[in-house]
Image: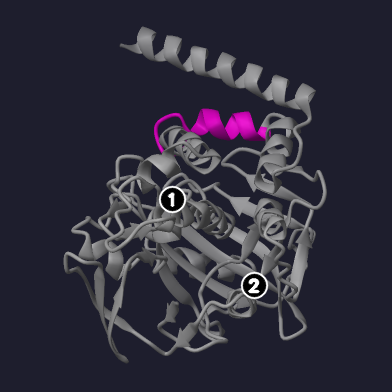
């Protein structure tokens, strides 16, 4: 049974960038999510000193969660999942025989509960887990295009303001058949002094010739993945943003899908032949052995570089050659790597890291 607090179609603030990896994972399950979207072929990145772009082609698409999530819920229902809309979960507890849920529609009892309930996860709170230190504040608006926008086949990231422990973005989107641009600001709480994301977005809109008072900003928070976090307790387990997503960029749709792809077989094994109480404590180990966790750990390392003192070096690395962005696009899309480009990127990265270590040692 799927409990949904709202009723579909329901709004979900999100820039909507879905890497092709996510669609490939769904297709492997026999699910096609056919909703209005904008095809993305590449990424452009602006740093403090330079800008670069790469376009391998077909790396993903931008969707509206209003439509995408509704289509996913319909796909689940078509496979026999009971989808109950407008049911708010108010409390979750382990009663020794399973998991009890107090909801707006009455009490429920389950052998297992998967918390896919996002950054404010009530399932996570019921497990006594902290909110997490890798929290981000995000604000976005949908606007008309401007003459200075990048090509509509690119996701544009702007990290040119070093005061921002994050980035601004411009993503092409489609709303009710209209070609618009989703613009926003992502800020991770890793530095002592942070900009107010709403004011930062307003200033950016004004520079683009857009009146911010005519826009309807949507604010939300995100949670980054932290490897040490316990992801299960008794019959409760966490997936998607309740567990944690990419802390560098806030990318989460494809990762949430990948959590689900892992969770299905794991739950099937847990239920196979079991009578009575289900214990899901092996979920953290299941995730830690996965490609998803390896990817998130790498991104966690990149976060420490990009949002630390090495940020100028990382920006120069990204903008110094199209190969870095090209390989990044392929990773986003889960495309086969261009091995010569990947080798060049790894070589440059190692040389740059050694240079930073030597420089820091000499300074010390």
What segment is highlighted magenta in the picture? 306-319
Query: Exactly how many numbered labels are in the figure?
Result: 2
The Cα–Cα distance between marks 1 and 2, rounded to whole angstroms, is 22 Å
Left or right of residue 223: residue 149: right
Q: Nearer the viewer, residue 113 or 34?
A: 113
Residue at the image position 43 percent from the left and 50 percent from the top: 164
Residue 357 vertical placement versus 313 (above, below): above
Q: Tell me, yes or no, whether the highlighted magenta stretch contains residue 44.
A: no
Say which element carries label 2: loop
Mark yes or no: residue 237 visible. Answer: yes
| Rendered image quadrant of residue 291 | top right
Residue 124 position, x and y percent, is 28, 62
Residue identified by numbered label 1 = 164
Q: Secondary structure at mark 1?
A: loop
Q: Which residue is mark 2?
A: 209
Whether residue 51 appears in this view of the structure is no
Q: Residue at x 66, y 54 (%)?
A: 25
Provide residue 262's location: percent of width, then percent of height. 51, 51
In the image, 198 versus 49, the foreground residue is 198
Describe residue 337's horizontal placement relative to residue 307 as left or right. Answer: right
């Amino acid at each position: 049974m799927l409990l949904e607090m709202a009723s579909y179609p329901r709004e979900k603030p999100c820039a909507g960038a879905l890497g092709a990896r996510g669609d490939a994972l769904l297709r492997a399950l026999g699910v096609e999510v056919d909703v209005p979207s904008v095809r993305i072929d590449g990424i452009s990145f602006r740093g403090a000193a330079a800008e670069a772009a790469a376009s391998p082609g077909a790396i993903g698409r931008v969707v509206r969660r209003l439509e995408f999530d509704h289509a996913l819920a319909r796909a689940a229902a078509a496979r026999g999942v009971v989808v109950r809309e407008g049911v708010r979960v108010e409390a979750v507890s382990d009663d020794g025989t399973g998991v009890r849920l107090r909801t707006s529609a009455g009490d429920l009892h389950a052998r297992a509960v998967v918390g896919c309930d996002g950054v404010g996860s009530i399932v996570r709170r019921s497990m006594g887990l902290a909110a997490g230190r890798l929290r981000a504040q995000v604000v976005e608006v949908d606007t008309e295009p401007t003459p200075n926008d990048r090509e509509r086949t690119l996701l544009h990231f702007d990290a040119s303001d070093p005061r921002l422990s994050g980035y601004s973005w411009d993503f092409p989107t489609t709303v009710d058949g209209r070609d618009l641009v989703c613009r926003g600001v992502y800020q991770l709480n890793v530095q002592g002094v942070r900009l107010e994301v709403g004011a930062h977005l307003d200033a950016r809109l004004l520079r683009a010739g857009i009146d911010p008072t005519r826009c309807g900003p949507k604010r939300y928070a995100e949670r980054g993945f932290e490897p040490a976090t316990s992801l299960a307790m008794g019959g409760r387990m966490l997936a998607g943003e309740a567990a944690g997503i990419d802390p560098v960029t806030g990318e989460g749709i494809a990762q949430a899908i990948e959590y689900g792809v892992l969770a299905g077989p794991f739950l099937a094994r847990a239920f196979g032949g079991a009578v009575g109480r289900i214990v899901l404590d092996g979920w953290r180990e299941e995730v830690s052995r996965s490609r998803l966790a390896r990817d998130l750990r790498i991104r966690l390392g990149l976060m420490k570089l990009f949002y630390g003192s090495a940020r100028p070096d990382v920006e120069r690395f990204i903008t110094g050659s199209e190969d870095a962005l090209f390989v990044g696009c392929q990773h986003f899309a889960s495309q086969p790597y261009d091995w010569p480009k990947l080798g060049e990127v790894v070589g440059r990265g190692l040389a740059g890291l050694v240079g930073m270590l030597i420089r820091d040692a000499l300074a010390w």
